[in-house]
Image (cartoon, rainbow, N blue to C red):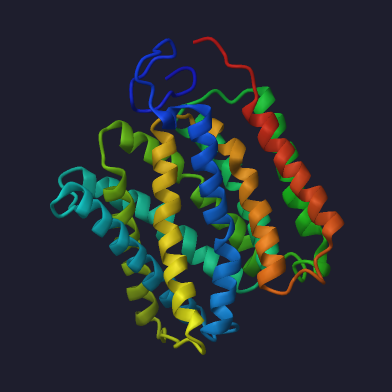
C-alpha cells in the first residue's frame, strides 16, 4: 500500500459534505488532547496505587496480579459500555477472536507486565518520558511492518531527535532514575516497543469492520485474565489498600485504560498513525507534571534536564509528522 492511510471511512480529501467532526483538525486536537491526559496520568496514578496498596518492593507476582485485575475490570467496563450501545451482549465471533487475542498479547499481556515491573523500579517521571517513545515505535512499525506509511528521511530525523530526549533523561543517572537499569527503565522501554504495535493492529482490524469497543473490552478482559492467572500460579497475593483512596485510584486506573484505547481507535478511523503521534508529547508533559505534584518528586526532579528531554521529544514528534505529503 502506498501513501498514508486516510482511515477506515473511505472519505476522500475532496469530499466537502457531511464531514464528521472527528475527521477534522479540531476533532483530532480535542480527542488527542484527552488521550494525552489519560495516558499521561497513568504512571503517577499507578505509582501512587503501589504505595497505597503496599506494593512497593512486593514480589513480581503480586504486581502482576494487581495489573491483571485492573485490566479485567477495564475490560468489563468496555464490554458493558459496548453492550449497552448495541442493546445486546458484545461477544466476538469467528475471525474476530484472533484479532482480540493478538491485540491482547501486545497491548495488555506483554506491554503491561513489563510496564508494571519496570514502574516498580523507576520514578513516575522517568517512566512517563520513556513511554512517550511509543509514538516513534508506532511510526516505525506502521511504515516498515505494515507499510501503511512511507518512512522518509524527514521522519527518520524526527525519530532520532525524539530518542535523543529519551537518552538525555536516562543518562541523567541517580538524580532522576537511580541509574539506568534493565529491571526499571529497560523494561519500560521494552513495554513501549510492544505498545507501538497496537495502533497498526487496531488500524488493520478497524478497516476490516471490527467494533472498537469489542476489541478494546475483550482484549483487556482476556489479557488481564492471563496476567491474573499467571500471577496466582506464581504465588501472587492480592493486597488490600491502606486507605479508601486506594479503591478510587484503582477504579480510575481501570477506567482510563479503556477510555484511552477507545479514543485511539476512534482517531485511527480518520487519521494516519503519524498524524496522531504528533500529539504524543502531551503524555510526557502531563506525566511529568502529575508525577512531580502527586508523588513528591518535584524537589528531586532536575527540571532543566527534564525540559531539555521534553523539548527534544516534542521536536522529534513535530519533525516526524510535518513531513511533506508524498504523491502516491
* Front position in the image: 173 or 253: 253
- Tell me how many marks there are: 0
Q: Let me know if residue 153 appears in the view.
A: yes
Position of residue 191 measured from the top left corner of the image (x, y, whole percent): 54, 57
Asked where in the image residue 154 lies, by quadrant, the reply is top right
Position of residue 312 measured from the top left corner of the image (x, y, whole percent): 77, 42
Q: Residue furthest left?
A: 88
Q: Residue at 39% across / 39% down in the picture?
A: 266
Up/down of 57 relative to 153, above or below: below
Q: Residue at 55% across / 36% down in the picture?
A: 29
Position of residue 142 measured from the top left corner of the image (x, y, whole percent): 49, 33
Q: Residue at 44% across / 28% down in the picture?
A: 23
Q: Let me know if residue 122 appears in the view.
A: no
Asked where in the image residue 139 lies, by quadrant, the reply is top right
Q: Is residue 228 left or right of residue 121?
A: left
Up/down of 193 relative to 25, above or below: below
Q: Is residue 184 left or right of residue 205?
A: right
* Front position in the image: 286 or 91: 286
Q: Is residue 192 left or right of residue 2?
A: right
Asked where in the image residue 218 lies, by quadrant, the reply is bottom left
Question: Which part of the image, by quadrant, shows the N terminus?
Answer: top left
Position of residue 119 measured from the top left corner of the image (x, y, whole percent): 60, 69
Q: Is residue 166 left or right of residue 145?
A: right
* Front position in the image: 26 or 272: 26
Amino acid at each position: 500500500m502506498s501513501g498514508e492511510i486516510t482511515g477506515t471511512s473511505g472519505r476522500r480529501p475532496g469530499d466537502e459534505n457531511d464531514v464528521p467532526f472527528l475527521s477534522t483538525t479540531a476533532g483530532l486536537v480535542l480527542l488527542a488532547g484527552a488521550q494525552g491526559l489519560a495516558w499521561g496520568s497513568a504512571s503517577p496514578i499507578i505509582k501512587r496505587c503501589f504505595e497505597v496498596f503496599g506494593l512497593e518492593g512486593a514480589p513480581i507476582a503480586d504486581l502482576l496480579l494487581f495489573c491483571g485485575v485492573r485490566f479485567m475490570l477495564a475490560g468489563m467496563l468496555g464490554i458493558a459500555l459496548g453492550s449497552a450501545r448495541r442493546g445486546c451482549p458484545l461477544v466476538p465471533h469467528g475471525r474476530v477472536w484472533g484479532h482480540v487475542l493478538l491485540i491482547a498479547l501486545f497491548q495488555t499481556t506483554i506491554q503491561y507486565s513489563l510496564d508494571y515491573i519496570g514502574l516498580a523500579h523507576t520514578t513516575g517521571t522517568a517512566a512517563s518520558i520513556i513511554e512517550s517513545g511509543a509514538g516513534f515505535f508506532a511510526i516505525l512499525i506502521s511504515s516498515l511492518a505494515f507499510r501503511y506509511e512511507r518512512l522518509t528521511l524527514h521522519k527518520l530525523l524526527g525519530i532520532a531527535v525524539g530518542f535523543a530526549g529519551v537518552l538525555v533523561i536516562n543518562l541523567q543517572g541517580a538524580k532522576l532514575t537511580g541509574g539506568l537499569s534493565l529491571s526499571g527503565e529497560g523494561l519500560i522501554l521494552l513495554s513501549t516497543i510492544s505498545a507501538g504495535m497496537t495502533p497498526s493492529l487496531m488500524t488493520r482490524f478497524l478497516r476490516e469492520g471490527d467494533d472498537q469497543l469489542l476489541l478494546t473490552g475483550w482484549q483487556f478482559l482476556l489479557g488481564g485474565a492471563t496476567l491474573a492467572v499467571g500471577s496466582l500460579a506464581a504465588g501472587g497475593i492480592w493486597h488490600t489498600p491502606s486507605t479508601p483512596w486506594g479503591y478510587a485510584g484503582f477504579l480510575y486506573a481501570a477506567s482510563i485504560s479503556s477510555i484511552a484505547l477507545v479514543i485511539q481507535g476512534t482517531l485511527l478511523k480518520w487519521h494516519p498513525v503519524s498524524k496522531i503521534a504528533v500529539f504524543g508529547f502531551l503524555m510526557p508533559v502531563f506525566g511529568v507534571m502529575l508525577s512531580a505534584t502527586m508523588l513528591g518528586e518535584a524537589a528531586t526532579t532536575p527540571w532543566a534536564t527534564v525540559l531539555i528531554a521534553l523539548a527534544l521529544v516534542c521536536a522529534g514528534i513535530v519533525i516526524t509528522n510535518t513531513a511533506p505529503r508524498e504523491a502516491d
